[in-house]
Image (spheres, grey):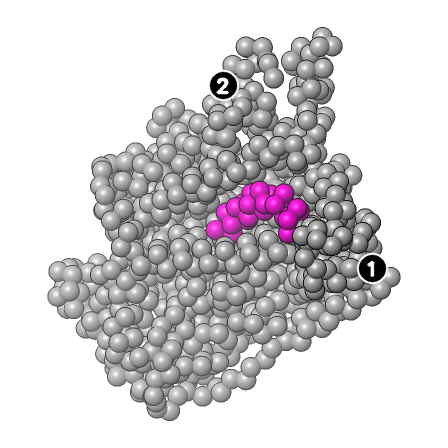
Amino acid sequence: MHFPRRVRMLFGGMTGLVLAFLYLPLAIIVVLSFNTVSSLSWPPKGFTLHWWQSAMHSTGARDALLVSLKTAAGATAIALVLGLLAALAVHRFKFFGRETLNLMIVLPIALPGIVTGIALNAAFRQAGFDLGLLTLIIAHATFCIVVLYNNLLARFRRLSPNLEEASADLGAHTFQTFRYVTFPLLRTALLAGGLLAFGLSFDEIVVTTFTSGAGLETLPIWIFKNLSRGDQQPIVTVVATAVMLLSVIPVWLAQRLTSGDGPLTGGTR
Amino acid sequence: MTATTIPSGSGIPSGPGKSASRWLHRHPRTRLIALIGAPATWMIVLYIGSLASLFLTSLYRLNDDGSGIDKVIGTQNYRTLIDQSVYLDIALRTVKIAVLVTLVDIVLALPIAFFIAKVVGGLWRRLLIASVLVPLWASYLVKAFSWRAIIGSPGGVLDKTFGVSPNYGEVGLIIVLAYLWLPYMIVPIYAGLERLPDSLLDASSDLGAHFGFTFRRVVLPLLFPSIVAGSVFTFSLSLGDYIAVDLVGGKTQVIGSVVYDNFSADLPFAAAFAVVPVIVMVAYILGIRRSGALENL
Amino acid sequence: MKNARYLGALVAMTLLAAACGDDKKSSGEALAAIGEGEKALNLVVWAGYAEDGSTYPEYDWVHPFQDQTGCVVKSKIAATSDEMFQLMGTGDYDGVSASGDASVRLIDAKLVDPVNTALIKNYADLSPFLKDQRYNSSDGKNYGIPHGWGANYLMWRTDVVTTAPDSWSVVFDKGSPYAGKVTAYDAPIYIADAALYLKTAQPDLGIEDPYSLNQAQFDASVALLKDQHSIIGEYWNDYTKTQGAFEQGSTVLGTTWQVIFNLATTNGAPLETVVPKEGATGWSDTWMVSSKAAHPNCMYMWMDYITSPAVQAQVAYYFGEAPANPKACDEINTQFADPTHCDVFKANDSAFAQSIAFWATPRKQCLNGKGSDCVPFSAWIKAWTEIKG
């Protein structure tokens, strides 16, 4: 696609500005993680590795990270299964309530987190469930489903239906077709959706506040706790920086794996 | 789908999977239920059930000395919401903020999404997409706190660099919320642009249109569903936020803050006020269904 | 059509389940003797009250307690008194470090049981002005063990507010030259601060007790706060927020805690505090036992532990408050080489403590015993939303 030079420069420039906008606060966070002053204020007054050392020894941070990883993994796994089932059903069948189901699946992410949070909190308590890791995973899975569902549905729509028919014509039964033909085509959509769902769960705080229980801390809750301590704030900048840097790996990987799926996906080009 | 008998020696094994598959093929209803059963039950029982429970709670009432909830159904909470003008003010203010945040995000997202999807390719494209997604992984809380140090006046980064700064308040809040949700607007627009065939743009320019015209009259209308899809995120995230509001909004009160403040002290009332964003979002979603945006989430 | 029926049934069932509450019975009696530890303890606490070394390795009084008693502690940090009240309502916790704006509600709602203070051996040493107060006792029964206390001071930046104020009038002055840079505490209980000011500033309102207000007194206080709203830059209930604001200079005047002053001045902000002539409100925190406690013995062990001089020293020094046990003052000097802590926080100043209007939850039955038509806290909460606009 060839665009006139002016257009390229204009859009390139605007992109640069937007990227600067996106990364300026992040740069400040990184810089402040080395600040000698114990509150998050600008400009930095000195350089120290104290906070980085403190964070590495922090059992609270490690435990919280573990809880967050477990929650996100559990929620993503459930969302993968339920999202796939729902997408299959909605794509292949016309049934009463299809529109309603579509709407329902979208709701948890369309409604503000605080509504989802207090609704689930009230429901769990009414039903007599203790708030803990399980309720947390259930709550997170509920808003992660839509991410997988939409990604998969979009992929289904791009897939040529001929592939599955061809497979059946060649004698494969339903499960074999799914396993050898459909699923491989879905893999990258599952990966992209799963990664997005994982990220959503990992950084979520509002619903978490209402559905975790005594003493259960995810990383965002731990961060919130430390932001509320006047002399501990820079430690959260360390954690945020570390998570950001580490996240480059899965984000980049997902990018490499999902781009260039080729003609099999039956795109519109 | 027509199933043929398997010729012997074809190499495809038969077995329980085969018979199950054949049975399922003859009972499409069961197939559907097997697929839809789990997600539907999950959503209905868990989510819709809890929303219904929330709505029911909104009809209850706090007892006089504030020590517990009277499980007596009445509309007193809703009457308070309607009678006291402050709640309407807060609701309208919140919607206004959400709309402005959405508009800002659309304006910021379009150029970068277009640049990534159409102007560059290959390695650059992958790098840029990754660079848009990475900020999502930096903690929302830390980002909001960082903005506190940026827009504070006096003493914030903007103030020290440029001498002028919005300070904590609605303007600052809109900037920060637009910042926080920007990637959620970029991604659907990018996806929509990816689906947009280059040939259309070529055709338009072949027909003599200059770029601006093509962008306005060809690209934007086709992008409409994607833009609306992105707006669902920015709108709902802004509608319910209370943490960023507390950090950079100054004394601004929004729906989220009132719900959060009242959640512990007066749950029925909080539930009643929480119904407001639900109504707004459900209406919004039902309204945009026709635009096809829902498929682009 | 079948789908619709199933759907309807499912929704109806969930609604039914929702409508059926979950009522556990409470014993209503204080513990007679401390028995065997139950090996677990669930607490609701303010941030910094139950440190286990995960924030700073050197501040850990939870692990020694666990080693001594075998009670494994899980603590849930609450950001506001309202949250504490709500968490205690779930019945999942054994105890709470309640401030006065939650404690009375907890007592009234029967979410906490009376406490047998004879079982707490450190109780005798605790400052007498904290015992049997209206925020931790009711009907002659004691409901909690004091933990620590502090006042809500007026603080200002000396480089901006050049004349040292001596009256709360500076934060209520609609024409203030510092408009947009004034702060106030973000909770309905702050209405009491307005009432406290009006007690002196408008004596014909007849306000005696800022937590026992009749409708006219309440309306006057609310009106004052609505006027104040125009000069407020930010409200705060997360103290680090206002600490940063004072350091940055975006806030120059308003209500704060001693710990904010300490931390901000360490970071170089030029500040001063004063207790204005009208007096000050304050907070005194009490450990209370849940009426649905699953581990009451561990809770009593905790209360005894946390009021011992050595632990009180750590708690008071770390958090920045006056310890309930004056014996902690020497310990603070021993452990942290700070001989002035108790002086700075006025831990032994009984006269000062008695002049503070400690947080208490307003209720219809006036707290000061003079009448039964006082404005209840639920109205305070609603009013607060209106004040903030």
Q: CA distance from mark 2 to mark 1?
A: 59 Å
Residue C248 counted in the magenta span: no
Measuring 54% from the left and 23% from the top, which residue is drawn there? Answer: B121
Q: Residue at x 74, y 63 (%)?
A: B20
Amino acid identity at mark 1: Arg
Residue drawn at (33%, 67%), measured in percent from left and top? C50
Give the number of the disc on residue C21. Answer: none
Q: What residue would you read off at disc 1? A: B26
Across and down, in percent, residue B221 comes to 72, 26
Q: Residue A100: tell me if it is visible.
A: no
Which residue was labeled with disc 2? A13
- The image shows residue A86 at horizontal and vertical percentages of 69, 53
Chain under disc 1 = B
Q: Nearer the viewer, residue C266 or B209?
A: B209
Q: Main secondary structure of the magenta part?
A: helix
The stretch in magenta equals A179-202
Quadrant (top left/top right/bottom left/bottom right) for the C terminus of chain A: top right
Q: Is residue B235 visible?
A: yes
Q: Give how far across and how far down residue C27 sits, in percent.
A: 49, 87
